[in-house]
Image (spheres, rainbow, N blue to C red):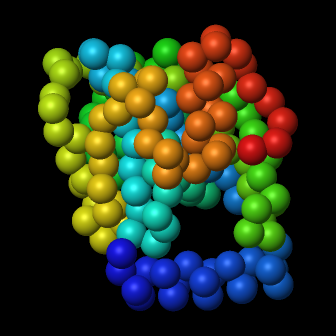
Amino acid sequence: MALHHRLIGKAARLVWKVTKPRTFGVRAVLLDQNDRIALVRHTYTDAWYLPGGGVKKGESVEAALLRELEEEVAVVSPQIERVLGIYHSRREAKDDHIVIFAARTVSGPSSNLPKADLMEIEEARWFALDQIPASASPATVRRITEYRSGVTGLGAW
């Protein structure tokens, strides 16, 4: 894992403690044609996460999701099935709102999931829904469980 990315992350968290910014993000429960889920490990953390990221000023949540999926895992034009939930996180001293989408790739299954942004993504892989790695973040595991249960989520991240 890149030391400079960890240091930048620590510096950002210090700034957030002072400024307490409101942020807005998107993530996807992204499945392929074999019902495998896409997960990513960033260069600045060890846990596995759903792909996604921040919504830029003037950008719709749909446009942000499509941009993030292309940037992180090179998936273009997935079929968005539904909004899985909208969540609120106070982690890292931010006032963060996250919209989670359920989406599916439209191309045939691939054994590899490319990490498109080599500066941000350490690893990207497909996982069977019943074989999520133990190092997945707790919130990621909760979102996958909600998806598998057919629940629409709200509330705390």
Residue 81: x and y in percent read: 49, 15
Above or below, comparing residue 87 to residue 2 in the picture: above
Residue 116: x and y in percent read: 24, 54
| 52 and 136: which is toward the camera | 136
Could you tell me which residue is drawn at 23 percent across and 41 percent down? 113
Along the horizontal axis of the image, is 111 left or right of 47?
left
The mark total stands at 0
Residue 31: x and y in percent read: 38, 24
Residue 96: x and y in percent read: 74, 55
Could you tell me which residue is drawn at 74 percent across and 77 percent down? 16
Tell me the quarter of the image containing the C terminus: top right
Above or below, comparing residue 112 to residue 118 in the picture: above
Could you tell me which residue is drawn at 46 percent across and 64 percent down? 46
Residue positioned most to the top: 150
Q: Is residue 97 visible?
A: yes
Say which quarter of the image contains residue 13.
Answer: bottom right
Say which quarter of the image contains residue 36.
Answer: top left
Along the horizontal axis of the image, is 130 left or right of 25?
left
Above or below, comparing residue 5 to residue 105 in the picture: below
Tell me the quarter of the image containing the N terminus: bottom left
Q: Can residue 22 be seen in this view?
A: no
Could you tell me which residue is drawn at 56 percent across and 29 percent down? 144
Say which quarter of the image contains residue 37.
Answer: top left
Residue positioned most to the front: 134
